[in-house]
Image (tube, coloured by chain):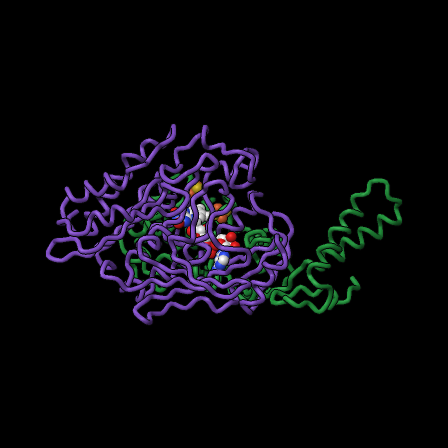
Chain colours: A purple, B green
Amino acid sequence: MNQFQYVQPTKQKAAIEALVKNANAQFIAGGTNLLDLMKHGIVAPEKLVDINKLPLKKISHENSSLRIGALALNSEVADNKLVLAKQPLLAQALNAGASGQLRNMATMGGNILQRTRCPYFYDIALPCNKREPGSGCSALAGFNRMHAIFGYSDKCIAVHPSDMSVALAALDVTVVVAGPQGERQILFTDLHRLPGDQPEKDTTLTRGELILDIIIPDTPFAQQVHYLKVRDRASYAFALVSVAAALATQNNIITAARLAMGGVAHKPWRLSETEKSLVGKPVSEKTFQEAAEIAMRGAQAFTHNAYKLKLAPNILVEALKTAAGIA
Amino acid sequence: MSIDKNAGNNQPAAENNNGLPNEDRRTFLKKTSAVVALALTPPTVLKAASMDEKIAAAFEQVKITLNINGNRHKLAVEPRVTLLDLLREDLKLTGTKKGCDYGQCGACTVHVNGQRVLACLSLAVMQDGKKITTIEGLAAGEKLHPMQEAFIKHDGLQCGYCTPGQIMSAVACVREGQANSEGQIREYMSGNICRCGAYPNIVNAILEVKNGGQKV
Ligand SMILES: Cc1cc2nc3c(=O)[nH]c(=O)nc-3n(C[C@H](O)[C@H](O)[C@H](O)COP(=O)(O)OP(=O)(O)OC[C@H]3O[C@@H](n4cnc5c(N)ncnc54)[C@H](O)[C@@H]3O)c2cc1C
Ligand code: FES
Ligand code: FES
């Protein structure tokens, strides 16, 4: 790891200023993604701004929403009584990620902003537009088993690795951030971007912006939920494909639905069209099969990931069945 | 070394250092290494330069206090040193193992303020004031911890390389209340990889401790 300076500000303003002043400074929270990237030589910040002294750990329920501080640990959130009662989908997605040790270190903000696990992003000897803009995408004609089937560009076909973010994409979440220009709120689904011509940019955050809180509103679809993740081994592996499903039903008729997929795109892939198509339909395997067809429209695979075209709709159907209680 | 202690004071919370501002210090460090890099420098200059390097090194050290296995350690560490390297290289507590160094195997599992974490993905400077327990601190004097006893009884190891991490993780797993069945243990112990495949015996050891109801 390269040398770097270390500061631990106690004031939000100082933390943000430290990033604005130094283009090579970076926030560190749990460090489980950033230190990994630094050890691999993928990033080399000159200065680490440790944000752990900022008061951003609180989990509360007010104004019909759950509010979770950016520094709340993944394990704390997954075990929290309010979270389990109000948003069980979030707890399920958190527990599907990483390991007991890592969840004790990883924070909400860091989890959202973790970077791709594309093997070419990690291999600093090979071209990667995300790591080194303009160098090319090695995955296009390379080993692309883990890669995207939706929303990619000819510059980048990497996927976002976070499980938790898939659940957040489904739950109509808002993210509160603070930057040099003050605070603003961003819809979670607008936070991550598609690669387009700038795959080096994962998000729409601007320089120095700090995630403060995430806000999850109470909704009618918060209780009939399921997070289903398929991976290469039973546990402790990133998703090949995952689905977050949330339903509201009345007399066996679907009144609202929320769906997002992981492991298929550069950002958590929200399925708005599919959600709309479900409303008014009866809870049945047939309904869910039809939904899966809609969900997969426009999907296109590469040499090694055509299996996702079959796996993804199957997982979607299973997740919906489990959420609806007919699995 | 005779350095003005305040000149390069790099305390963790020091956004406004009372000595050189951070950016100046960075430039200073860069210049210093440039000087050292000059190949044909006369010996006297070289000597002065390497002295500068020492001062520079001191500037970069951060003072921290850790409680490790019940002992207070006052340390000065470079920001880039991981808790794992600090334990193994500086304090010679080599019970904690380095398997992958990238968070993938669990061999480096220790407890920080009672929670299991990976020492290879933790910076030592970020642990200031915390309480660390390693495998060396688990036994009560000569008396092994019940989890250590159970691993021996059930042959929960072959080569033993993953074992300190397995045991630290297992103790935490029971404390967290995540060791109620074989399935749950396998899920919540999945962050600890065993190349020798001692998993069935590890699970049995944990089940025995859990079902024995002793305080762990
Ligand atoms: C072996 C291994 C397996 C894993 N498996 C999974 C898995 O199966 N599923 C999964 O979802 N994840 C997995 N992870 C990833 C893990 O979830 C992330 O590393 C973790 O969530 C990152 O959180 P952190 O607090 O440690 O982030 P850090 O490493 O501290 O930070 C990550 C990034 O976020 C930025 N940042 C952090 N907090 C803020 C904030 N509040 N505001 C602005 N910027 C911020 C940092 O600057 C940095 O760029 C795995 C990781 C490892 C090492
Ligand atoms: S050495 Fe830390 S997880 Fe492998
Ligand atoms: S006992 Fe050899 S790696 Fe686990």
Camera-nearest residue between B127 and B169: B127
Q: Is residue B61 left or right of residue A256?
A: right
Whether residue B191 is visible, yes or no, is no
Camera-nearest residue between A226 and A210: A210
Camera-nearest residue between B196 and A319: A319
Number of marks: 0
Is the residue B206 above or below the residue A241 in the image? Answer: below
Residue displayed at 17% across by 47% down: A327
Give the residue at the far left of this rendering: A251
Residue displayed at 35% across by 47% down: B202
Residue A90 image offset from top left, x and y in percent: 32, 57
Give the residue at the far bottom of this rendering: A62
Is the residue A212 above or below the residue B47 in the image? Answer: below
Residue A262 image offset from top left, x and y in percent: 35, 45
Is the residue A61 above or below the residue A50 in the image? Answer: below
Quarter, ligand 3: top left
Residue B164 image offset from top left, x and y in percent: 46, 51
Residue A280 image offset from top left, x and y in percent: 15, 52
Whether residue A190 is visible, yes or no, is yes
Camera-nearest residue between B103 and B93: B103
Residue displayed at 48% across by 69% down: A55
